[in-house]
C-alpha cells in the first residue's frame, strides 16, 4: 500500500533518481529545485518506506497545474500512478482547487489514458512543442473543470 506525504525541497536527493529514471528527457536539477515555495503543492509517494513517485504542482486562486508526475519504472503498471494522481486531486481539492490543468506529450498514451480516466479532457494542442528537429512532438493541453 502506498503512503503519501508532502514533498519538501530537502527531499531532492530522494526524487531526482526517480525523475531521471522515469522521464526520457528529465528536468534539470535547477528546474526541479525552482518548484518549491508557497504557491507549490508537491507530494511524495512511498512504498514500504521507499520513495516510489512524486508530483509537482502549483495552486493559485483555485487553479491547479500539474507540472510533473512520475512513478519509478520499478513500480509502474501496478496502479500507483493512478493512486498518486488521485492523491494530488484530493489534496488540491482540500486546498480549494476547482480547476486542474496539465500538458503532456501527444505520444504519451499511457499518461493520457490515465488522465482521461480521471476526468481530464483535451482542450488545446501546441504543435511541435516538445523536442527539436525530427523528434518534435505536439503538446496536448488538458483540463479538469468539474469534480467527478
Ligand atoms: C504516467 C505514469 C505516472 C503512470 O503511472 P503507472 O503507475 O505506470 O500507472 P498505473 O499502473 O496507475 O496505470 C494507470 C493507467 O495508465 C494507463 N496505462 C498504464 N500502463 C499502460 C500501457 N502500457 N499502455 C497504455 N496505457 C497504460 C491505463 O489507463 C492505466 O489504467 P488501468 O490500468 O486502470 O487501465 C508513469 O507511467 C510514469 O511515471 N511515466 C513516466 C513519466 C510520465 O510520463 N509522466 C507523465 C507526464 S509528465
Image: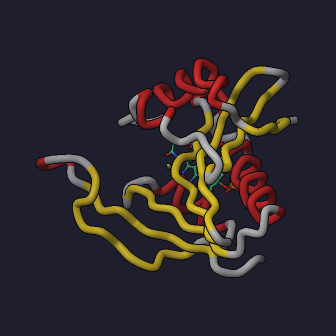
Q: Please state which of residues 80 and 26 is positioned toward the viewer in this rendering.
A: 26
Left/right placement of residue 51 relative to residue 123 reads right
Residue drawn where x is 80% and y is 37% of the image: 5
Residue 25 x %, y %: 36, 36
Question: Where does the image place residue 82, in percent across and percent down from the top left?
Answer: 71, 52
Seen as rendered, the residue at the extreme front is 38
What residue is drawn where x is 51% and y is 31%? 19
Q: In the rendered view, how is the structure colored? A: secondary structure
Taking 33 as reference, is 86 above or below it? below
Q: Position of residue 22 (x, y in %)?
A: 50, 33
Q: Position of residue 20 (x, y in %)?
A: 46, 26
Figure quadrant of the C terminus:
bottom right
Viewer-side residue, 67 vs 115: 67
The quadrant in which the N terminus is found is top right
Residue 41 drawn above or below residue 16: below
Q: Is residue 126 left or right of residue 103?
A: left
Q: Quadrant of residue 48?
A: top right
Q: Residue at x 65, y 38 (%)?
A: 54
User: Which residue is at a point 83% across and 36% down the rendered structure image?
Assistant: 2
- In the rendered picture of this protein, how many numbered marks are placed on residues? 0
Asked if 20 appears above or below 64 in the picture, the reply is: above
Amino acid at each position: 500500500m502506498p503512503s503519501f506525504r508532502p514533498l519538501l525541497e530537502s527531499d531532492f536527493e530522494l526524487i531526482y533518481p526517480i525523475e531521471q529514471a522515469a522521464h526520457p528527457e528529465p528536468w534539470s536539477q535547477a528546474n526541479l529545485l525552482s518548484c518549491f515555495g508557497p504557491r507549490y503543492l508537491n507530494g511524495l509517494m512511498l512504498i514500504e518506506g521507499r520513495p516510489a513517485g512524486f508530483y509537482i504542482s502549483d495552486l493559485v486562486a483555485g487553479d491547479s497545474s500539474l507540472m510533473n508526475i512520475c512513478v519509478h519504472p520499478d513500480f509502474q503498471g501496478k496502479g500507483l500512478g493512478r493512486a498518486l494522481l488521485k492523491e494530488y486531486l484530493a489534496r488540491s481539492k482540500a486546498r480549494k482547487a476547482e480547476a486542474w490543468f496539465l500538458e503532456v506529450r501527444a505520444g504519451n498514451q499511457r499518461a493520457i489514458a490515465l488522465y482521461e480516466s480521471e476526468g481530464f479532457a483535451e482542450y488545446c494542442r501546441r504543435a511541435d512543442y516538445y523536442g527539436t528537429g525530427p523528434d518534435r512532438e505536439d503538446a496536448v493541453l488538458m483540463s479538469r473543470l468539474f469534480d467527478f
